[in-house]
């Protein structure tokens, strides 16, 4: 889909729900890079930034943040009052690390970081490998499969459930709740989407609250146990914060990695990438993973607020104004990445922004990288001749950019 560009006024009209766009946003990004990489996206109603240099700088610029209602009232912002039917969803957002700024963000982030220390993550490699083989064993004899449903989705769900200490058999319900909640970030979400998200948020919170209370008498080495210890240690973590943090980690810990695995396999198959070269040793595998993350990342739009009056890239912003950082476009910026649309397994350096930057840099980045570097080589080794069976389909959630299905076949 070609965006409607007003170069003089730096305005763009581009429907995020148009299948031509969310199935392939990169053609639109290329046009935007050429015409006006700093633009007002009329459909969203805020200024957006597509250049790599701008996005990288804004992610680190403390004049901008995720939270704004600690500085301005809803009336001052021109926002309507919260919708009563969204109360369960809003209650979780209120305590989400992703939506907070220091000092609350710092306190919660430090607690969560304990679970994602490198030595803990590195130990998960054999478990991820076993899961990959287990999943492939289920469908290898069939000659074809939907890799999103059969491979990309189950592995991250099981890994994050194990890390948190949640039973794996809850996987289907966790994914269902997560999908319904994530749909809230979809452009133009309607009342039905809101009510589904609210019901999912209530059910998810009830489950985590009940599980955590039962876990208090049987603490282990999992993240929920560590958070429970922090909860009782001088009141550093409230129960509401614990519930919101666990749900965020469950959602983020599988949603993005599911998409990264699916998008990565699609990129390799469509681009004719030779897996024997791509995964020829540890360094080649690491470079391949970074390039796959750059080319088709799971998160495309990250929103922030101006915490004070500011000027950036010639745009004057008032306190409270919302801005959009286009991570997917920044990763294809020709000014930063030569031949930005091509896979280059030897690309170095590769400073993509798929995991963000600054204080909101993705806490699960080491885990996501490990899952990709372990699962993808096993998949291509176990299924020689892997190829697309039909055109892949992306989900109608532009900024959470991931496949709805990935039908493949093999010899």
Image (cartoon, rainbow, N blue to C red):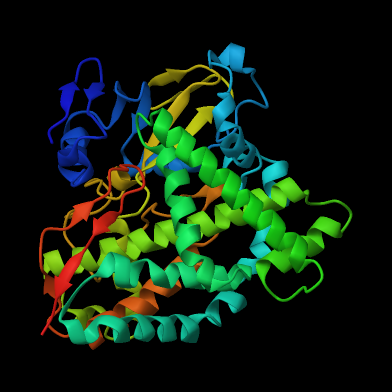
Q: Residue at x 37, y 49 (%)?
A: 299
Left or right position of 199 against 185: right
Quarter where residue 83 is shown: top right
In the foreground, 280 or 98 = 98
Give how far across and how far down residue 80 sits, in percent. 54, 16
Give how far across and how far down residue 335 sits, in percent. 24, 45
Against 167, residue 236 (above or below) is above
Give how far across and how far down residue 314 sits, in percent. 37, 22
Q: Residue at x 27, y 32 (%)?
A: 37
Give how far across and how far down residue 242 sits, in percent. 70, 53
Quarter where residue 42 is shown: top left
Asked if residue 282 shows in the view, the reply is no
Against 403, residue 313 (above or below) is above
Asked if residue 167 shows in the view, the reply is yes
Count the marks: how many?
0
Q: Residue at x 25, y 53 (%)?
A: 337
Q: Residue at x 61, y 67 (%)?
A: 164
Which corner quadrant holds the C terminus? bottom left
In the foreground, 261 or 295 = 261
Which corner quadrant holds the N terminus? top left
């Amino acid at each position: 889909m070609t965006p409607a560009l007003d170069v003089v006024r730096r305005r763009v009209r581009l429907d995020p729900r148009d299948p031509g766009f969310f199935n392939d946003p990169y053609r639109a990004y290329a046009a935007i890079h050429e015409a006006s990489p700093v633009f007002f996206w009329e459909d969203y109603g805020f200024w957006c930034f597509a250049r790599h240099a701008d996005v990288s700088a804004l992610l680190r610029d403390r004049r901008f943040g995720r939270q704004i209602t600690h500085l301005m009232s809803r009336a001052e912002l021109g926002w309507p009052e919260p919708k009563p039917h969204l109360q369960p969803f809003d209650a979780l957002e209120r305590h989400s690390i992703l939506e907070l700024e220091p000092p609350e963000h710092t306190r919660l982030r430090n607690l969560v970081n304990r679970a994602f220390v490198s030595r803990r993550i590195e130990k998960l490699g054999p478990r991820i490998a076993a899961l990959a083989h287990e999943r492939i064993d289920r469908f290898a004899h069939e000659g074809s499969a939907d890799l999103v449903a059969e491979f990309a989705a189950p592995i991250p769900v099981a890994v994050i459930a194990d890390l948190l200490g949640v039973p794996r058999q809850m996987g289907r319900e966790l994914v269902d709740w997560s999908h319904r909640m994530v749909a809230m970030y979809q452009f133009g979400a309607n009342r039905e989407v809101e009510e589904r998200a609210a019901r999912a948020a209530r059910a998810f919170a009830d489950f985590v609250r009940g599980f955590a209370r039962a876990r208090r008498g049987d603490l282990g080495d999992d993240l929920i146990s560590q958070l429970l210890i922090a909860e009782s240690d001088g009141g550093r973590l409230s129960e509401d914060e614990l519930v919101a943090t666990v749900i965020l980690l469950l959602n983020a810990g599988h949603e993005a990695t599911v998409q990264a695995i699916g998008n990565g396999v699609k990129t390799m198959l469509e681009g004719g990438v030779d897996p024997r070269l791509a995964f020829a040793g540890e360094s080649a595998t690491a470079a391949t993973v970074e390039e796959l993350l750059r080319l088709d990342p799971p998160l495309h739009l990250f929103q922030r607020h101006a915490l004070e009056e500011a000027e950036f890239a010639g745009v004057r912003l008032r306190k409270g104004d919302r801005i959009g950082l286009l991570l997917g476009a920044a990763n294809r910026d020709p000014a930063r990445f030569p031949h930005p649309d091509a896979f280059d397994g030897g690309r170095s350096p590769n400073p993509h922004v798929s995991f963000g930057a600054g204080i909101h840099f993705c806490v699960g980045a080491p885990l996501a990288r490990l899952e990709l570097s372990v699962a993808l080589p096993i998949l291509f080794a176990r299924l020689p001749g892997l190829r697309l069976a039909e055109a892949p389909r992306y989900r109608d959630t532009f900024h959470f950019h991931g496949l709805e299905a990935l039908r493949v076949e093999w010899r």
